[in-house]
């Protein structure tokens, strides 16, 4: 009986590990290189099909201060999300939950200010979670 309990515990633990947050796979949806000023850019989503529940923005090479993000959906609707966060190079925004159903993204427009103190331009990468 003890052997059976040990085997059961092993399988339960291994199955729970496969559902951990570290195993969540985000789909890369596109990227943009940002300017050195208050600006607006957009990432057109063409490669990935399907409805997304969440998005996040990742920043590389130089810090970016986000103001807001507008998600445009294929059905013509759009959703404005206030972010107002300073994201350092190598950082990312919080996970952004998208409202409603049938959220097939056509593009994401983001408003930002990048820092003039840094000589290189930042790169903003967009990821989505089904």
Image (cartoon, rainbow, N blue to C red):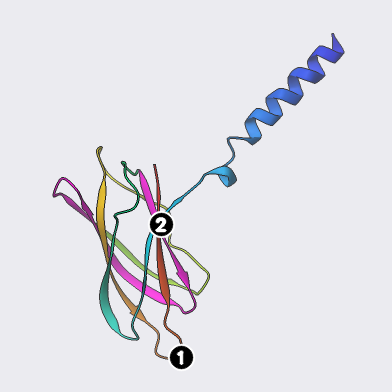
> Mark 1 — residue?
119
Specify whether residue 54 is painted magenta. Answer: yes
Q: Is residue 99 left or right of residue 1?
A: left
Under tag 2, what secondary structure?
strand
Q: Position of residue 64 (x, y in %)?
A: 40, 76
Farthest top residue in view: 1
Q: Position of residue 35 (x, y in %)?
A: 33, 83
The quadrant the N terminus occupies is top right
- Tell me the tag on residue 96: none
The quadrant the C terminus occupies is top left
Farthest right residue in view: 2
> What residue is drawn where x is 39% and y is 90%?
116
> Mark 2 — residue?
56
Under tag 1, what secondary structure?
loop
Overall secondary structure of the magenta section: strand
- Give the mark nearer the N terminus: 2 vs 1: 2
Q: Is residue 51 left or right of residue 79?
A: right
Label 1 neighbour load within 10 Å: few <14, some 14-19, many 20+: few
Q: Is residue 121 left or right of residue 89?
A: left
With respect to residue 43, does 7 lie above or below?
above
Label 2 neighbour load within 10 Å: few <14, some 14-19, many 20+: some
User: Badges 2 and 1: C-beta atoms under 8 Å apart?
Assistant: no
Q: Position of residue 97 (x, y in %)?
A: 35, 48
Quadrant of res 93: bottom left
Q: Position of residue 43 (x, y in %)?
A: 30, 64
- Write down the region rendered in magenta: 53-79
């Amino acid at each position: 009986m003890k052997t059976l309990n040990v085997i059961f515990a092993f399988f339960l633990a291994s199955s729970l590990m496969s559902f951990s947050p570290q195993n969540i796979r985000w789909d890369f949806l596109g990227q943009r290189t940002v300017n050195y000023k208050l600006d607006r850019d957009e990432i057109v989503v063409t490669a990935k099909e399907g409805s997304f529940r969440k998005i996040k923005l990742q920043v590389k090479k130089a810090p970016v201060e986000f103001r807001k993000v507008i998600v445009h959906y294929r059905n013509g609707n759009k959703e404005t999300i206030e972010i107002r966060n300073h994201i350092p190079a190598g950082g990312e925004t919080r996970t952004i939950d998208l409202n409603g159903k049938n959220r097939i993204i056509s593009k994401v427009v983001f408003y930002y200010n990048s820092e003039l103190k840094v000589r290189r331009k930042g790169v903003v990468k967009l990821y989505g979670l089904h």
